[in-house]
Image (cartoon, rainbow, N blue to C red):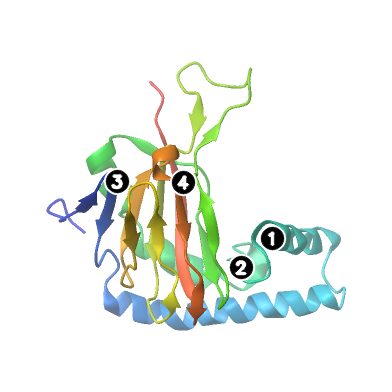
Amino acid sequence: MDSDTKYLTMDGVHVIPNFIEKESLDELKPLLLNGLDNWYLHLEKAENKTLSAMEIAKIKQNKATYGNNILKLDHSEKSGNKDLYDAVAKYMANDKHEIEHLFGEIQPEDKFGITVMLTGSLITPHTDEQVFPQGLRTVNKMTLRDITSVCYLNDDYEGGELCFDLLGIKIKPKAGTLVFFPTPKRYKHSVTTVTNGQRFSVSKFWNFKSS
């Protein structure tokens, strides 16, 4: 995307359609399905106890946090997902520039992750803002995660709308759409139940650079 990008803005929720072009999405599709296959293979190894204790603990933590129907595709060297993460990183290389165009200088909180919502999954209302524990705040900031961004890698599923209940906004983005928004309580959001198919997305958290 270039500096002439047309943002669709609704009460501070910003949407960039076609942030990733169709040809690139077509390239990603088999890599995403392979990533899902790798997850199930990983799960089978865990059940057969052929993984390390640390890897098994990671799978249990994912289930405890997200349930059985929401998966976080592993980006470790052993996961088999290197080509997928490299391709996504290439096609999303310009997201920082687009967000800074509206919000000023930012930096990513951590590596991005690819989330898969399977049929029957949903995400309950929540905010992404994290407040520093008392005594651990920085001089210039009291919170982590100033901006959330989500890029949608497919749209061949039913349900799975992104909802901002306090703002009365519901979004069912087309594949390749980038959505970003601030993290305070006003932007509490949820994802409705995926009633059919698999929903692939990339989530990132961003912090304003302290002066």
- Residue 123, horizontal then vertical, whole percent: 54, 60
CA separation in Å, label 1 and label 3: 29 Å
Q: Earlier in the sequence, mark 3 or mark 4?
A: 3
The numbered dot on residue 62 is: 1
Q: Nearer the viewer, residue 85 or 154?
A: 154
Q: Residue at x 65, y 75 (%)?
A: 39
- Residue 101, horizontal then vertical, whole percent: 23, 42
Question: Is residue 180 visible from the viewing direction of this image?
Answer: yes
Q: Nearer the viewer, mark 2 or mark 3?
A: 2
CA separation in Å, label 3 and label 4: 11 Å
| Disc 2, SS | strand
* Residue position marked by numbered label 4 in the rendering: 205
Discs 1, 2 touching: Cβ within 8 Å: yes
Query: Please, what is the three-letter code of the amino acid marked with disc 4?
Result: Phe
Q: Earlier in the sequence, mark 4 or mark 2?
A: 2
Q: Residue at x 53, y 20 (%)?
A: 138
Image quadrant containing the N terminus: bottom left
| Disc 3, SS | helix
Query: Please, what is the three-letter code of the amino acid marked with disc 1?
Result: Asn
* Residue position marked by numbered label 2 in the rendering: 71
CA separation in Å, label 1 and label 2: 7 Å
Query: Please, what is the three-letter code of the amino acid marked with disc 2?
Result: Leu
206 relative to 63, above or below? above
